Image (tube, grey):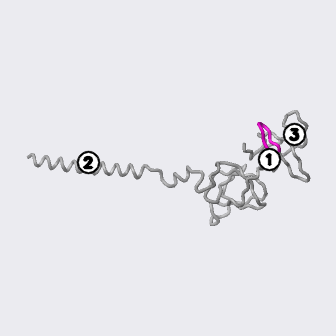
Amino acid sequence: MINIKFFIFHKDCKFLFFVIIFLVINLIFFSQPTLSETQNSKKSINGSGLKVPRMASLKKSLTYVRTGPGKEFPIKSEINQKGYPVEIIAEFNNWRKVKTRGNFSGWIHTQLLSSFKTGLIVSNTLLKKRPLDTSKDLAKLLPDLLINIKKCKKEWCYIEVIKNKNFFGWVKIKNIWGFTSK
């Protein structure tokens, strides 16, 4: 009788042992984040090592925006303005995922991007001679006007407007899309 109880107890221990091993293996292998979860949480994979997000501008007057990071991905759209500012929101090797002022996003090769500081005027604003609200008005700037950002301090940026002739002056930072503190 004792031998039979020991055999039954021994069988129960084997079963319990295999259940514990099974649970430990599942915990080890299946509690790790999946590859897609780790890629979605990273903003840079083999990228530049620079801060993301950051601003850049387009080097060419015709730039293709693709659906993914590679020439094998279809062209999603094109941007036809040299110097147009974009926000880099992710990196993959030599490709940058960018976002425009209108929240349009896609992938552009790094050779088509520049670190030259540009911006877009976001609302009707006045170009001032000095960084003061009481300063002389030099020009009225309309929304979506492309500007070159020369330097910024506190609430103001010194900018260049290139039209028939160049205009230089000060604009409040809040009226510029594309401003970065650097």
Magenta-tinted stretch: 149-158
Name above or below for residue 81 compared with residue 178: below
- Circles 2 and 3, Cβ within 8 Å, touching? The answer is no
- Residue at label 3? 128
Report the residue at 76% width, 58% height from top: 59
Q: Amino acid at mark 3?
A: Lys
| Element type at mark 1 | strand
Classify mark 3: residues with Cα within 10 Å, few (<14), some (14-19) or many (20+). many
Report the residue at 87% width, 46% height from top: 168
Q: Amino acid at mark 1?
A: Ile
Report the residue at 28% width, 51% height from top: 18
Closer to the camera: disc 2 or disc 3? 3
- Residue at label 1? 149
- Left or right, 38 with respect to 49, comes to left
- Left or right, 60 with respect to 134, comes to left
| Element type at mark 2 | helix
Name above or below for residue 75 compared with residue 39: below
User: Which mark, residue 16?
Assistant: 2
